[in-house]
Image (tube, grey):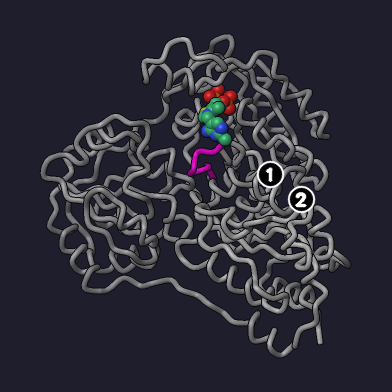
Amino acid sequence: MITVREAVFSMLRERGMTTMFGNPGSTELPFLADFPDDFTYILGLQEAVAVGIADGFAQASGRPALVNLHTAPGVGNAMGAVFNAQANKAPLVVTAGQQARSLMTLQANLTNRDAIRMPHPLVKWSYEPPRAEDVPHALARATHLATLPPQGPVFVSIPMDDWAVEVDPETMRHHTTRSVRGRAVADPALVEELARALKGASAPVLVAGPDIDASGGREAAVSLAEAQRLPVWASPAPGGGRLGFPEDHPLFQGILPPAIAPLSETLTGHDLVLVAGSSVFPYYPNIPGALLPPGTALWAITNDPDEAARAPMGNAIVADVALTLTALAERAGASERGAPAPRPAPEPAPDSDPMSPSRAMATLAEVFPEDGIVVLESPSSTLALRNQLRLRRSGSYYFGAGGGLGFGLSAAIGVQLAQPGRPVVCVLGEGSVQYAVQGLWTAAAYRVPVTFLVVRNDEYAILKWFAALESVDGAPGLDLPALDSVAVAAGYGVNARPVSDVDDLREQLRGAIASDAPELIEVRVAPGMALA
Ligand SMILES: Cc1ncc(C[n+]2csc(CCOP(=O)(O)OP(=O)(O)O)c2C)c(N)n1
């Protein structure tokens, strides 16, 4: 016989899930007992941070990640990060300890009284196994569900006395060694129909979404766009957690605006819009208008049935994005259409004191390494970064698609752990730092060499911009005077310094990116939103 604990660790080992993330309590200690040498436990000092690190790790490694939280309050703390993981389609197996079975009915301290209901509606599946013997099967099932498309977080609650229970090794082997995979190929008749529509269109356009990158479809997207001479727009920034197309490619036009009216205006002149790997569309804020220009048709390719069903217009094919783009490129062949004019090079950002956010992003672009990765959560400089720094390689950009702050700082640590050979630069607003600030300790303690570039403007700049858009005057709570990220970082053990001069910023960034320890640079910028 073997224990539940042994069966679960051997399943995790077999699936390559040997790095786990968590914040422990008494209800989790039996799981962590005699922690095997070939596993790594990454401690987050708050549960949202543990989940955010796991989110970045899962996305950047392409593998599911296990998170272990502390019963009800731990799950409660983690909910914002689980929301983000759902929006990012990150395959997370979130587990939480539970009171011993014999004490659950009388609701002893630490009982999660309705563990299954608690993480809804943010998870694909939520479960508490009826018997201890069912824990390995439940975790195997959870892992399959997290990784089947559309990927996303799942939840399993595990009573603390289950781990030592003995189970039959042969039954466990059956439960835990199955492979369950599913990249659906699109119906060839549908691909043919779309290929005909594309060939027959006079001015088609491609909208490239994050799931092109997640599905490994970048080359297929480039081949299709080049053969069909398609201008390419990135899906709107708020929902674009990854880059579906190289941003320095001559066919690349820029980022679609996220609100209904300007988005549809941007697509004017195109008779066919092909959206790949994005919802239609991650709209925000509410600027009503026509959904599409008159006479324009839309087709979407998505691996997510809900994304397909909830779109307000157009046709959709539900299948793996990379496989479908490859099949479509084969069917559509080459076109003689004229290629669109390339996107202009970024305007040089002029000098000013304090420097503009655009100047800070242009300086980052000057020193950014070819194989670098950006994790971005600096709301008022998002467009400036995407304009100044034109990222080309796949897996080079991660952004919290759900919009919940706290993703950036924590995910950057997970991305760096998953991609130790590539330098990670995490660009954060000083307000955004505070939603996952405890992650700085994890970066220091495990020596995860992320460069944190904190954009300091002493305010919630994006919210002031929204206030003007919404005609809101006199809203309180939009200024952040005296928030000293350098002092905070030092308290967590991260090397940190302020800069206010462009030459200094360039030198500090070079040094930080080359360093094998985490480094934080706080750059002083002018207040306000940067639009390019
Ligand atoms: C969890 C969470 N709470 C609150 C918000 C609302 N929010 C959006 S942007 C923002 C301000 C961010 O400030 P900062 O990081 O300094 O960036 P800036 O706007 O100055 O660029 C806030 C509070 C959010 N998106 N997520």
Q: Residue at x 58, y 41 (%)?
A: 375
Which span of residues is magenta-colored?
A: 398-404
Q: At label 2, which amino acid type do we have?
A: Asn
Q: Residue at x 79, y 71 (%)?
A: 163
- In the image, residue 378 sits, relative to residue 325, either above or below, namely above
Q: Earlier in the sequence, mark 2 or mark 1?
A: 2
Q: Inspect this view and state whether residue 363 appears.
A: no
Q: What secondary structure is the magenta-colored segment mainly?
A: loop
In the picture, measured across the screen, residue 24 lies left or right of residue 223, that is right
Q: Magenta span has 402?
A: yes
Q: Residue at x 83, y 65 (%)?
A: 30
- In the image, residue 22 sits, relative to residue 162, either above or below, namely above
Q: Inspect this view and state whether residue 4 appears.
A: yes
Q: Indicate the position of residue 94 as horizontal and vertical percent values.
A: 64, 58
- In the image, residue 215 sits, relative to residue 495, either above or below, namely below
Residue 364, label in figure: none
Residue 49, label in figure: 1
Asked where in the image residue 248 lies, by quadrant, the reply is: top left
Q: Indicate the position of residue 259 as horizontal and vertical percent values.
A: 32, 33
Q: Indicate the position of residue 63 as horizontal and vertical percent values.
A: 60, 63
Q: Which residue occupies the extreme bottom position in the image?
A: 170
Mark 1, secondary structure of its residue: helix
Q: Magenta span has 245?
A: no
Q: Indicate the position of residue 143 as horizontal and vertical percent values.
A: 59, 68
In the picture, measured across the screen, residue 402 lies left or right of residue 222, that is right
